[in-house]
Amino acid sequence: MTIVSKPRHAKRDSRARRTRDRLGAALRQLMQQNTLDEITVQDVLNEAGVSRSAFYAHFNSTQDLLLTDMDEFLERVATALCGSGQPERIAPVREFFSHVGEAEQVRGALLRSHRLSDFFDLAREHFARGIVQRLREVSRARELPEIEREALAHALAGALMAHLDWWTRHENQVTAEQMDRKFHELAWAAIASATSE
């Protein structure tokens, strides 16, 4: 029996990932009671049970931690359908909205900390890139020139953020599934219009 050990860097990477996850979770927890400006690095360290040196090995400030945490989440969700082979959807709207709906306290914390616009800006950027990738994959949009594909993806990402803003302001009166259908009706109409020109 041969025992294969993981390379040292893999162990360090998984440990670093766990530390980053703990710090992000601690910050989100603290933001449910305080604004970001009221939360110190020491508050995050106490909540996460992580050393100061471990924090500064990854982040410069609590704001850096927040933006990195949001950025990593949005990157994962915005590209979740890429390579999935699902031709009927170009963005994981249902999954994204469901997650946002469940994280209402985090949304409130971002709003109180005047960081909600940062979230929307990052989300728009990530979804534009994810939608461009999906438009390259789906047969109905492959014939579009790249510049048109990118312009369309940015417009659709903006529409997606407008949908999300409306949905959260109306206290989720419409299901995430319904919002997914509405978004894709709009998206496919825009794609059909762009490809027929």
Image: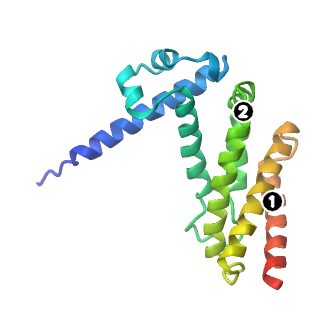
Residue for point 71% across, 70% down: 88
Instruction: State which quadrant residue 59 falls in.
Output: top left
Image x and y of residue 35, in percent: 67, 20
Residue at disc 2, secondary structure: helix
Image x and y of residue 174, in percent: 86, 46
Q: Mark 1 points at which residue?
A: 183
Is 63 in front, or is 4? 63
Task: Examine the rendered structure and indicate whether residue 20 appears above or below residue 73.
Answer: above
Q: Assess disc 2: are there few (<14), some (14-19) or many (≥20) residues with their C-alpha within 10 Å of its C-alpha.
A: some
Task: Examine the rendered structure and indicate whether residue 41 appears above or below residue 155.
Answer: above
Mark pair 1, 2: CA separation:
21 Å
Residue for point 73% across, 57% down: 157
Residue for point 18% across, 48% down: 5
Direction from residue 21 to residue 181 in the image, left or right? right
Image x and y of residue 118, in percent: 68, 39
- Marked residue nearer the N-terminal end (1 or 2): 2
Task: Examine the rendered structure and indicate whether residue 189 appears above or below residue 58.
Answer: below
Instruction: State which quadrant residue 32 falls in.
Output: top right
By what rule are the colours in the image chosen?
A: rainbow
Q: Mark 2 points at which residue?
A: 107
Residue at disc 1, secondary structure: helix
Direction from residue 149 to residue 84 in the image, left or right? left
Image x and y of residue 120, in percent: 72, 44
Q: Which amino acid does label 2 sit on?
A: Arg
Residue for point 68% across, 34% down: 103
Task: Examine the rendered structure and indicate whether residue 176 appears above or below residue 24.
Answer: below
Is 97 in front, or is 44? 44
Q: How many marks overall?
A: 2
The quarter of the rendered structure image containing the N terminus is: bottom left
